[in-house]
Every structure is written in C-alpha cells, then in structure tokens.
Amino acid sequence: MTKTVLRIDASARHTGSESRALTQRIVDRLAPTTVITRDLAVAVPAIDGDWLNANWTPEDQRTDTQRETLALSDTLIAELKAADTIVIGAPIYNFGIPATLKTWVDLIARAGITFKYSETGPQGLLTGKRAIVAITSGGTQVGSEIDFASGYLRHVLGFIRITDVQFVAADQLMVDADASHAKAEAALQALAA
C-alpha cells in the first residue's frame, strides 16, 4: 500500500494538460494516505554560481545567505525522501523534458545527500522508492529514437537509486488521441496500487 506520494507536475499548462490529468488519475489509483504536491509551473529558479558555491561549501561552514540559497533544494529533497512513490507528470517538449523538470533534477541531485561518489562510481542514496512517470506528447513516440525524455528520466532516477520506474504514456496525442488514451488507460489499469 502506498502511504505517501510526491506528485510533481511539470506542464506549463494548468487547464487542458494531459500530463496533469494523467498524474491525477495515477494518484487516485494509488489512493495514498498523504500526497505532497509540487507544481513546477510555478517558478523554480535555475542553479547558478551562488547555488554551486553554497552547495560545495561544507554544511557547517555555510553562511546564512548560502543556507537561504539552498533552502528550496533542501525542501525538494525532503519531499523526495518523505515519499514512498513519486508520480511525475512529464510532457515532452521538443523531444525532451520541460526546463522546469530539468531544474528540479538539478536541485535534487546533490552529492552526499541523494547520491555519493565511491571507488566504483556514483551510488544513489534513495532506496525503497517507486516512480511512476506520466509521460505525454503530441507527436513523439515514447521509446523512439527521438524521445530524449523517458530515457533521461529513467537514468536520472536510477542515478539517485530509484530503480523501480514505470511509465504511463499518452504519446502521439496529435496523431491518434483515441489510441493514445487507450494505451495510457491500459498502463494505468496495470499499475499495482
């Protein structure tokens, strides 16, 4: 049974968004006790030089300004750690993920917190979590050679050690919306609560 879901919506649209509708249906199917909602359409600042300097300063040596600079990142990581299941609404924009979703990745992928470096390479630190990605597109077929979104998301989630990743795709909506919706419905019904 899923206790806590982190729902992340990356669509720039609030009304008429296929990915938002799909994430809602997934969350409803999971019927969690708690839902943490993160809407990335609300401004998420990109990392910059100040952020990098703060991140690489040892925690006990950070200034108040550096702590403030990392506050959103700390909050996003806390949300991720609190969740049993992460549901990500990821529309494909120009063959990849929305910039705000990439920014979220930049803010949560932090050495020593969500992954660490070892003699054998990086190791993710978030274990026992599941991710379900509601991926939508107008024309890009998920899994095709022009889909740079699903592979990236699978890789980056695996990098922080979330390896149980499932996709519910409503792709090629502008090609055949009925077939796309039927495919997403079948994937949705196959999800274990």
Image: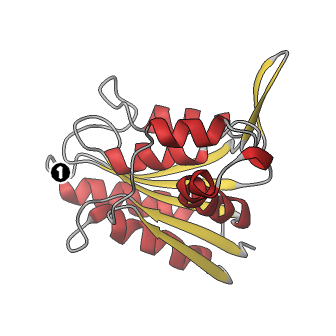
User: Which of 192 and 101 lies nearest the eye of the viewer?
Assistant: 101
Colouring chosen for the image of the structure: secondary structure
Classify residue 77 by image quadrant.
bottom right
Q: Is residue 65 above or below residue 154?
A: below
In the rendering, at what x and y percent does residue 81 appear? 72, 60
In the rendering, at what x and y percent does residue 55 appear? 63, 41
Residue 126, visible in the rendered structure:
no
Q: Residue at x 22, y 60 (%)?
A: 178
**As drawn, is 72 to the left or to the right of 58?**
left
**The N terminus lies in quadrant:** bottom right
In the rendering, at what x and y percent does residue 64 appear? 63, 58
Label 1 SS: loop
Mark 1 = which residue?
176
In the rendering, at what x and y percent does residue 44 appear? 39, 57
Q: Residue at x 53, y 53 (%)?
A: 69
Q: Is residue 73 above or below residue 114?
A: below
Q: Residue at x 34, y 71 (%)?
A: 21
Q: Residues within 10 Å of mark 1 (few under 14, many from 20)?
A: few
Give amino acid for label 1.
Asp
Residue 23, visible in the rendered structure:
yes
**As drawn, is 133 to the left or to the right of 116?**
left
**The C terminus lies in quadrant:** bottom right
Q: Is residue 120 above or below residue 16?
A: above
Q: Is residue 27 above or below residue 160?
A: below
**As drawn, is 163 to the left or to the right of 38?**
right
Q: Residue at x 36, y 38 (%)?
A: 142
Task: Please state the total of marks drawn on the protein image.
Answer: 1
